[in-house]
Every structure is written in C-alpha cells, then in structure tokens.
Image (spheres, rainbow, N blue to C red):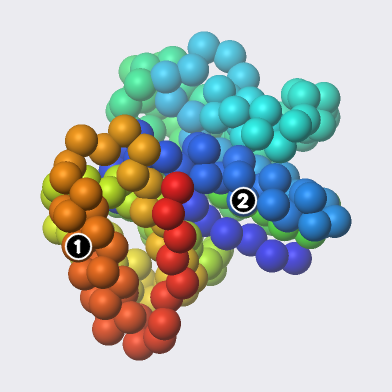
Amino acid sequence: MTSFFVCGTDTGVGKTFFTGLLANYFLNNGFSVVTQKWVQTGSKGFSQDILAHLKIMGKSRRYVKGIEDLVCPFSFHYPSSPHFAAELDKRKINIDKIKNSYRLLSKMFDVVVVEGVGGALVPLTKKFLLLDLVKELRIPVILVIANKLGAINHTILTFEAIRSRKLDLCALIFNSFGSNSPKKIQENNITTLIRFANLYFNKKIPHATI
C-alpha cells in the first residue's frame, strides 16, 4: 500500500485538482486507488472535492458506493476551518474515526491519496492540527504551492511545520494557473524554494509545475 497527503500552502492553491491528477495517474498505471478528504467544509451534501477527484479520474460516484463515509468521514455546511465549521453545525470531529477510515481504505486499495483541508496547520479540533494527524499516520507529504508573490514565505513556513514533525516531504507542486505575478517572480519562486527544500530536508526534492 502507498499513500500520499496532498498538503497546501493555503486554501485554494490547487490541492483538489492535483489530488485528482495523481489518483488518475495511479489508476492508469494499473493500481487500485481511492482519494480521501478527512473533512469537507462548505458542502451541503456529499464531498464536492471527492466528486471533483472522481471526475478527473473518469469515474462516477458509484466508484465509492458503500464507502462514502470512509472517503469523507466529516462534512460541514459552513466554508471555514474544520473546527469552526463543526462548532457551527453543533457537531464534533472525532480524530479516531478519521484514523480508522484511513486505515480501512489502506487495506482496500493499493493507493490512498488524501487531500488536505486549507493549509498545513488548520485546526481539526480546538487542540489538534491537521499536520498532527498526518504525523500520527506517518503519511508522506506532497506540497502544492500557489506560485505567486508571497509563495516563498508561505512555503518555508510550511517546510518548518513539516520538518518539525519529522514528516517525509516527497515532492513540490508549483501551481501557476491564474497567477497574476510576473513570470520572473514565478521562476524565482521555483528556484529559491527547491534550493531551500533540498537544504531543509537534506535530499533532492522532486518538483513539477501545473
């Protein structure tokens, strides 16, 4: 079994699109694969992000029939941080339920691709951050970066959070779609952040652009 956690430097950086692309890659190479969204906010029904993954994979919702509660254990109406969305819905996020759903999917599929919620340190509860759960489950991290002015600061702060938890950063994805920053800024972001990633994690970090 292989798994990846698709982390973002912020919300709206392209995690959903990349998660679908990665899952589709494994699917097209003969692996059984499923995507997971631990907490969906801003949704009034089934996870919109899971549906987006399925669309990119060329699959319908029937692909996850019977395991809907596993691929998205928690869904809330209000588009906010999970801890606040849960509070507004007068519900609680059970970390053990998320862990169990991930472990069950890991036994059912060759590959599990987990899409994060917002940025790296979003609170799942009032005392538990997103990367804390990734640490407990020991999932390798792929970091999606919005390639725009400010990316260097946001990304290096995220490096700090990943490294302090001794997580494996296995790739950087630079998303330039919709960026209004000059091309020379985008190019410098890539070279600067690759250099810092290699220094922070003491290895050559692969990268790609979308």
Q: Residue at x 31, y 72 (%)?
A: 194
- Of 168 and 149, which appears nearest the observer? 149
- Mark toward the viewer: 1 or 2: 1
Q: Are marks 1 and 2 in contact (CB under 8 Å)?
A: no
According to the image, label 2 marks what residue?
22
Instruction: Give the answer, above or below, for where 165 lies relative to 200.
Output: above
The total of numbered circles placed on residues is 2
Residue 111 percent coordinates (x, y): 72, 57
Tag 1: residue type?
A: Asn
Quarter placement of the N terminus: bottom right
Alpha carbon separation for disc pair 1 and 2: 26 Å
Q: Is residue 13 left or right of residue 141?
A: left
Viewer-nearest residue: 188 or 7: 188
Which residue is nearer to you in this view: 145 or 66? Answer: 145
On screen, residue 27 versus residue 180, left or right, reads right
Identify the residue at horizontal 44%, vertical 66% (top origin).
207
Above or below 53: residue 200: below
Which amino acid does the dot numbered 2 rest on?
Leu
The x, y position of residue 137, in whole percent, is 55, 63
Task: Please give the residue where the numbered disc 1 appears in the rendered image.
Answer: 188
- Expressed as whole percent of the image width and height from the top left, the position of residue 84 reads 31, 28
For the residue labelled by badge 1, is the local secondary structure a helix, a strand or a loop? helix
Chain-order first, disc 1 or disc 2:
2
Regarding mark 2 in the picture, which secondary structure is present there?
A: helix
Quadrant of residue 67 in the image? Answer: top right
Which residue in the rendered view is the most extreme toward the top? 44
Residue 102: tell me if it is visible.
Answer: no
